[in-house]
Image (tube, rainbow, N blue to C red):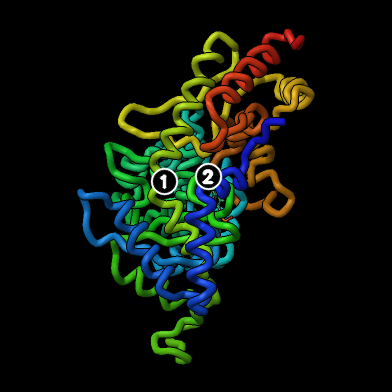
Amino acid sequence: MIPQTDPRANYLAHRSEIDAAIAVVLDRGRFVLGEEVAAFEREFADYLQGSGMRGVEAVGVASGTDALRLALRACGVGTGDTVITVSHTAVATVSAIQQCDAKPILIDIEPSTMTMDPVELEAAIVRCKAAGARPSAVVPVHLYGHPAAIKEIAAVAAHYGLRVIEDCAQAHGASVDGRHVGTFGDAAAFSFYPTKNLGAFGDGGALVTNNHDIAERVRSLREYGWRDRFVSVEPGVNSRLDEIQAAVLRVKLPHLDAENTARRRFAGIYSEKLAHTDAALPIEVAGTCHVFHQYVIRVTHRNAARAILSKRGINTLIHYPVPIHLQPAYTGDIRMQDPLRHTEKAANEVLSLPMFPELGDERAEEVAESVARALTGDSMP
Ligand SMILES: *Cc1c(COP(=O)(O)O)cnc(C)c1O
């Protein structure tokens, strides 16, 4: 059986280092927001800013959803505000907006990358303003590990005075013109859910920003709004990263680039072997680096292909089967364009093939050959 993802394999790849790092934390006896978290925050900020930037800060929190929610709050988003994002994303993106009592507006994607269409963004802002709403922020999602058109989105947002909060939950290490995603907006949110490109052994997340005031505000919000201990200066929440997760992330971070390279290598194998099929394959826009959190193809007879693959022991997933605006919790919520044509088409066609750093060339080739056969209707072994 070839799994779609395999966080245990990543543990085994770094087992002795991780076990040792966890033992140090247990021996030390400090378990929440201690020196491991502080060191990880510095190392992750340094990784993201590279040698070309200064002043980037990371703040560890309890999940990627919390990183988004607290980033929005620290950017001043609250009751009565409107936040624009896409419908083709994880529910978490929209949930974070609603947790700030803001109104999400969901717009369409560019079909080629399946990320936010900057032209739709501008149209949505103009319509929002005309309707008397207060669009205050935009949340582009770097979906599947491919950067959204972040420079174009940031330019539109700057023109209309909106804040930009990047959803980087699937894009640790992805870049545009050599600059990591997460450093383009006012703030960014990363998730360390176990299956992400940089994954912990439980929930975890980080807010990233080059605005010191935003970083300080999230440091306060994540712990009850404290400035000094036990004294809250504003209502906050409990959203802390723990020491064991931070220690695991510190072991894994130095391997992130090599693991992303491995993902790109398997993506290359898939793309080469599937080139002659009628599946639409992922693209990499010039100047960007795609880190293949997922390798997502588009096929019209998806269920038939999935069934054949599953018989051959190859697990696949669908990210995501139902766009947010069509989910029971969200139908009836306002949106600008109906229908979201490209979003609804993508939801019917996307198929995520196995992708994780330990997959290996041989299994990637086996998957690609099986997919090619499943798509050409020749399902014999
Ligand atoms: C995983 C994910 C999140 C949420 O992260 P959690 O750590 O699970 O809260 C947000 N947005 C996207 C696009 C994701 O894939």
Q: Image quadrant of residue 289?
A: top left
Which of these two is toward me, 162 or 133?
A: 162
Q: Residue at x 46, y 51 (%)?
A: 167
Q: Nearer the viewer, mark 2 or mark 1?
A: 2
Q: Is residue 250 left or right of residue 305?
A: left
Which of these two is toward me, 81 or 294?
A: 294
Quadrant housing the C terminus: top right
Q: Residue at x 68, y 12 (%)?
A: 373
Which callout, 2 or 1, points at the residue further toward the start of the chain? 2
Q: Residue at x 42, y 48 (%)?
A: 125
Q: Is residue 13 left or right of residue 318?
A: left
* Residue 227: x %, y % from top left: 39, 85
Residue at numbered disc 2: 13
Residue at numbered disc 1: 255
Above or below 67: residue 275: above
How crowded pointer 1 is (Cα within 10 Å; few <14, some 14-19, many 20+) is rated as few
Which of these two is toward me, 89 or 273?
A: 273
Amino acid tagged 2? Ala
Q: Residue at x 30, y 31 (%)?
A: 287
Alpha carbon separation for disc pair 2 and 1: 10 Å
Q: Are marks 2 and 1 in contact (CB under 8 Å)?
A: yes
* Residue 69: x %, y % from top left: 51, 64
